[in-house]
Image (spheres, rainbow, N blue to C red):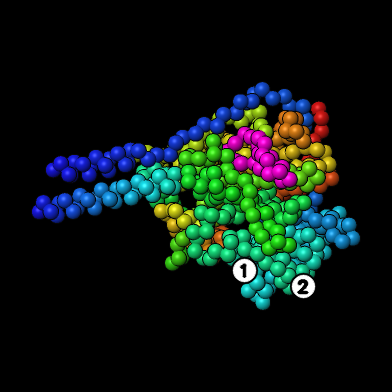
Amino acid sequence: MKLILFVFTILLLTILSCKFNSKNIDNHYEGKLVNNYNLVKISEKFFLLDSLTGQKNKYSQLFIDSIGRRVYTVLNYNKKTIYFYDFETTNLIETLKITKRDSNLLKYITAYFIKSKDSIYFHDNIKQKVLLLNSKKELIDSISLIGYMNPMLIDWTFKYPQYNPTASSPMLLSKQGLIYTGQFMWAIPDTLINNFKFTALVDFNKKKVSHISTYPDDIYSGILWDDPIYSTVYSDLDFENNKLVYSYPITHDVYVVDLSTNEQRTFFAGSNFAETITSIDRKKKGDLTYREKLKNHIVKTDLYGGIKYDKYNKVYYRFIRKGIQNAKPSDDLLDKSLAVIMFDKDFKYLGEKVIGKSKEWNWENSFVTKEGLNIEYIEQSNNDETQLMFKIFKPIKK
Amino acid sequence: MKKTLKTLSLIIAFGGLSLSAIAMGTSGGILDLLTMNEAEAKCCPTSINNGRCSYAKNCFPDAGGQSNDCDSTSGTCDEEGEIIR
């Protein structure tokens, strides 16, 4: 009898002692910022799509080719094809298709970086390798992103980042070499929070992959941020100053890494209207299913998005998906309003503007040119998806 | 009878402590680990379930997860639940 009581007590204490903490991330500048800039639409651009390619492609890159021409590329990963467009004329120049014959080489492409037509880095998201190919699709070199661990045995995910790349979390080329920011997909364990580094520095010359940057433990440690929507790390590079900036969905701050010294600084880069971000509650009796609870939380919470550095105007643009406070049961992520917040190069607040509902924009497909911030616009009337449309914005002082 | 009861109690105690250790290690609470199984996932059900469906219906490895319901090594899913490679 005494033994049974003892065992029961241990079990009870065990259950009661383990819990996720809750977290409130306050916006100390809410309502205090002065909006001195407007984000003005100055032009639009249309790229014709073929019958196999639709809108809302996840990955794209603008690069300068050997004759100084700006080339906009977009990945159709269903068809394993990269489309190359002349950015000035919007004419299709060519396509690069990974055929069945090549598929032993490249199983599942989700990202690439075009250094030149003869040097293209691909990320194979099943083999977890970066492969360097030339314009004839011949393999020049390859390197594992997971220390040559077996990608089919998923325990590597405790040691190395996973990748869900978009044009807002892309492969980049810095003075140090190829940079690729991934993430820990689910709620990060306390035991990993200070050791799990999510940005890979890929050095083909030294045949080496090293990692930098950990999640801010005051935000992520011991908290139930248990979906990739909370743990995505958006990034962009200020190439001239060799700085990499991170934007997390659930912090009002951004984090800037000096790639020369690996030192990191934190800057406030939040919205004037963003409220306190509160973590999702643990499920209680009588609650909705976890997925419904997750949906409600995502809809009601202000969630930041990607960040882009405009070297021409010396401005940062940061996206935010604004929470819907009196949300209807039918409301979803795409019903949230989308705003762009502007900061100068030192993260002094300049202003912000709501540009519409999230359903109208594929904001993850955005990039900066000398004309301004290009954001993919989803034409609701374009049911046949015959063209890819961008609206181009510029910050104008009021 | 007493011996059986004693053995059973030791097994239960060991199981409880193990569960607690796992829960602590994954920064989770036991109740949360149990409730995560209720995720309604509709992406790429296959015989090899080592991944979990995200809210956006992508399948990602979840090595410490309890509700794996898709094959993370086969690609991602489109809206109809078809595997895209």
Q: Is mark 2 on a helix, strand or loop?
A: loop
Q: Nearer the viewer, residue A299 or A115?
A: A115
The magenta-colored residue range is A246-266
Q: Which residue is drawn at 68% across and 40% down?
A: A263
Q: Which mark is residue B71?
A: none
Q: Which amino acid does label 2 sit on?
A: Lys
Point out the image quarter for the N terminus of chain A.
top left
Return the disc, 1 or 2, that comes first in the chain's sequence: 1
Q: Residue at x 70, y 59 (%)?
A: A203
Disc 2 target residue: A136
Q: What element carries label 1?
A: loop
Q: Distance between the residues labelled 1 and 2?
A: 17 Å
Point out the image quarter for the C terminus of chain A.
top right
Whether tag 1 and tag 2 are in contact, CB under 8 A, the answer is no
Q: Few, some or many C-alpha atoms within 10 Å of disc 2 (few <14, some 14-19, many ≥20)?
A: few
Is residue A374 in view?
no
Say which chain tag 2 marks: A
The verdict on residue A321 being magenta is no
Q: Which residue is drawn at 63% across and 52% down?
A: A211
Which residue is farthest left? B1
Seen in the image, is A28 located left or right of residue B67?
right
Which residue is farthest top? A32
Q: What residue type is labelled 1?
A: Lys
- Image coordinates of residue A177 in percent, x first then y, are 74, 55
The verdict on residue A249 being magenta is yes
Q: Is residue A32 above or below residue A202?
A: above
Give the quarter of the image for residue A255: top right
Dots 1 and 2 on the same chain: yes
Give the quarter of the image for residue A141: bottom right
Disc 1 target residue: A107
- Image coordinates of residue A347 in percent, x first then y, are 73, 33
Q: Few, some or many C-alpha atoms within 10 Å of disc 1 (few <14, some 14-19, many ≥20)?
A: many
